[in-house]
Image: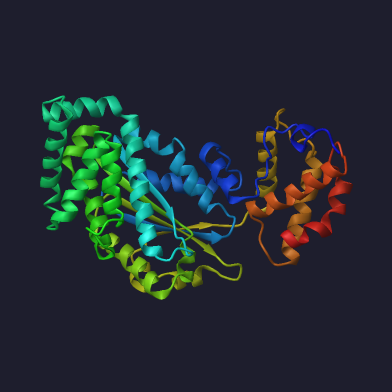
Amino acid sequence: MMNESLLEKYRFKEFPFPLSPAECLEEAKKVDLWADLSKVKKELENFFDMVLSLRPSISALLYGWRGTGKTYSMMFFSKSSFFKEMMERKKLQITVISVNLDVRAPHPYKLFYQRMINFFSTSFKENIKDSKNIIEKEVERIVGSKDRISQATALRRRFIEELSILTYDDRIKTRLAELFTNLLLQNEKGEEECRKILGLEEKELSEEDIPEITSVLFNFVASSKTLKNIFHCLDFKIILWIDEWESIMEIRAEDRWKIWDFLRHLLDYVPSDLVLLLNVTLKPDETERDIPNYFTHQLLDRIGRMIYFSSISKENALEYVSERLKYYSKEGTTFPFTEQTLKKAVQIINDIAIEKNTSITPKTLNKVFSIFLQDAFYEGREKIDEEFIEKEREKIKPYI
């Protein structure tokens, strides 16, 4: 029985090569590691800098093979300080809604919509939390009262007036006005009750109302003068980022068409301040030519930008593993690997990838280097040398 753990033996703060998607997502929320994706990170930064300065809505498709960093990008940009800095610089309010499709749900279209409403409320509340003192003062100034009941009545009336321009449906006007009133006044009980109705958990609204509720919601956020005055911002921007879009093909045809038509409706009826992003993971034998399989031609025609996440080169693979080891090392080194050992390991991985006509991805590297570390640890090795890496060649083949 070994007395010390792998982390202690090799002097890591945390394990440098996460294997589960959950670990990768948690890392994306707090760590800026982009050695393998520096070009696509820059492309996304430039994309957001441009589209968030424009009024017209825009859509983009992010595609590539599994493990190339699409979900990592979504989590990183959603949770990092990037949008907060942009909000301060451009005097914007940005609400990020990041959701995925769940093919196991009995009603995936409805669940997708419910998650969207919940994520919207959560993101909007975060914006309120960041500007709490300003919002409280502005609500008091606009309404002319500190009394919460008076504030709620006045805000609800203002919101209904603004919503009346966007819809004739009194049910939708009332519920959205109540939702924003409760969010701004931080009435959690009222917000929860309203979200239940908007989330179709009550019979007042139905699945047929989803397209109109969502388009009215987004248009209201984009156009409300009351919200802009309260938040002291020039514009509100909504980023709807959908992950695992390729799973649309695993959903039964009826729900698939509902989701396709829903997104087409959004792109047609939310003309400003919406950024729609779709992550598509291609199968190993697929290329860009197979992308239309995941869309109706009407929806695909409305995609304005395509961003490719490629596999990584041998040079970038070396940079990737070196950067991860140094980041998670207590000493900031690549120990227990030497520079030559890392080069040897990446060369073997590259040779196997060429032999199998496959690509190197960050996920591939995480799997293989996890095997190296675990096997070296159980063999009691203090350092990992080139001889050990060569011995592991056959073992790592199935993972590339």
Quarter occupied by the N terminus: top right
Q: How many marks?
A: 0
Residue 193: x, y in percent?
A: 27, 46
**Quarter of image, res 143:** top left
Question: Does residue 178 lie above or below 240 as drawn?
Answer: above
In the image, taking residue 201 as reference, residue 46 lies left or right, namely right
**Quarter of image, res 353:** bottom right
Q: Residue furthest bottom?
A: 253
Residue 202: x, y in percent?
A: 27, 56
Whether residue 304 appears in this view of the structure is no
Residue 288: x, y in percent?
A: 51, 68
> In front: 120, or 293?
120
Residue 231: x, y in percent?
A: 24, 33
In the image, taking residue 181 as reference, residue 398 lies left or right, namely right
Question: Does residue 309 lie above or below 188 as drawn?
Answer: below
Residue plotted at (13% across, 30% down): 142
Residue plotted at (29% across, 64% down): 207
Whether residue 174 appears in this view of the structure is yes
> In front: 315, or 383?
383
Residue plotted at (19% across, 28% down): 138
In the image, taking residue 198 as reference, residue 387 lies left or right, namely right
> In front: 310, or 221?
221
Residue plotted at (16% across, 24% down): 146
